[in-house]
Image (cartoon, grey):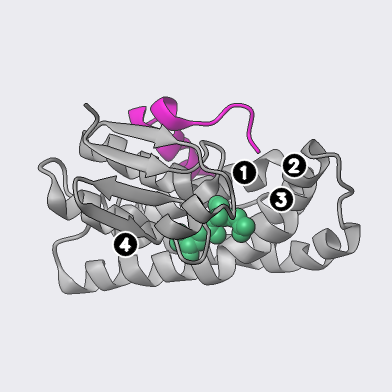
Amino acid sequence: MPDIKLYGFAPSSYTWTTRLAAEEKGISHELEPIEFGSDAHKALHPFAKIPIMEHGENRLYETSAICRYIDEAFDGPALQPADPMGRAEMEQWNSAVVDYFYDWCIRRIVVQRIVVPSRGGETDEAMVADAVSHARYTMEVANKRLGQSAFLAGDVPSIADFMLLPVAFYLKQVPEAAQTMADKPALEEWLARMQARPSFGATAPSPPG
Ligand SMILES: N[C@@H](CCC(=O)N[C@@H](CS)C(=O)NCC(=O)O)C(=O)O
């Protein structure tokens, strides 16, 4: 029996983050799809989002909370820095990914470029065009930080890196990558390091969406 159950879909950025955390921790997980907005979904998540995690009687939503639980409830390599500043910096990045990176990079560009057309819809070109400079700025901020240490909160990967990885990976798949991700060597090297980890190979959705 798998150690935890995750409700969600493999291509979802946030679901992917929790799957990366589980792999990095060395625990097994089962991924269960859910009918979006159904009563069953709302019974698990009052705001009808994914992912949701179950471990025995324990149920959680919100990606960073799930990742922290995975790290603290199971034995395995630490996914959070031990020192107060490192831990706080990890939380700072987790929050920044949710509040800034996801919105500008995923919701306004990647979803418009990949998800909307895959469902037969039309890309909102104005939304994409407006988001490009903001998305580029988020990547500049990450690149600057990654020029100082190998990972976002220090010399070893933490939950913050697993929050950012799907965002940066997906942003690289769209044509706007030329404007948002070019000339950012530290970010590029970090992305290569993250993609070389076994957790990436074990969880990378195909095709991206
Ligand atoms: N703050 C939530 C955000 C979750 C979220 O927005 N998930 C996306 C998938 S990556 C979702 O459920 N989107 C569907 C929708 O917004 O209707 C978290 O950290 O888990």
Looking at the picture, does residue 140 appear above or below residue 34?
A: below
* In-image side of 123 versus 207 (left or right): right
Residue under circle 4? Answer: 65
* Badge 2 amino acid: Ile
Q: Residue furthest left?
A: 75
> Where residue 170 is drawn, which disc sits there?
1
Q: Is 81 in the magenta?
A: no
Q: Which of the 4 quarters of the picture holds residue 190? A: top left
- Circles 3 and 1: CB atoms closer than 8 Å: no
Rounded to the nearest angstrom, the CA distance separating label 2 from label 3 is 5 Å
The local secondary structure at tag 4 comes to: helix
Magenta span: helix, strand or loop, mainly? Answer: helix
The local secondary structure at tag 2 comes to: helix
> Where residue 14 is drawn, which disc sits there?
none
Residue under circle 3? Answer: 111
* Badge 4 amino acid: Ala
Badge 1 or badge 4: first in the primary sequence:
4
Q: Nearer the viewer, residue 81 or 110?
A: 110
- Circles 2 and 1: CB atoms closer than 8 Å: yes
State which region is magenta. Answer: 188-209
- Circles 2 and 3: CB atoms closer than 8 Å: yes
Residue at (83%, 64%) from the top-left corner? 127
Residue at (57%, 42%) from the top-left corner? 169
Tag in front: 2 or 1: 2
Rounded to the nearest angstrom, the CA distance separating label 3 from label 1 is 9 Å
* In-image side of 120 versus 35 (left or right): right
Residue under circle 2? Answer: 114
Q: Residues within 10 Å of mark 1 (few under 14, many from 20)?
A: many
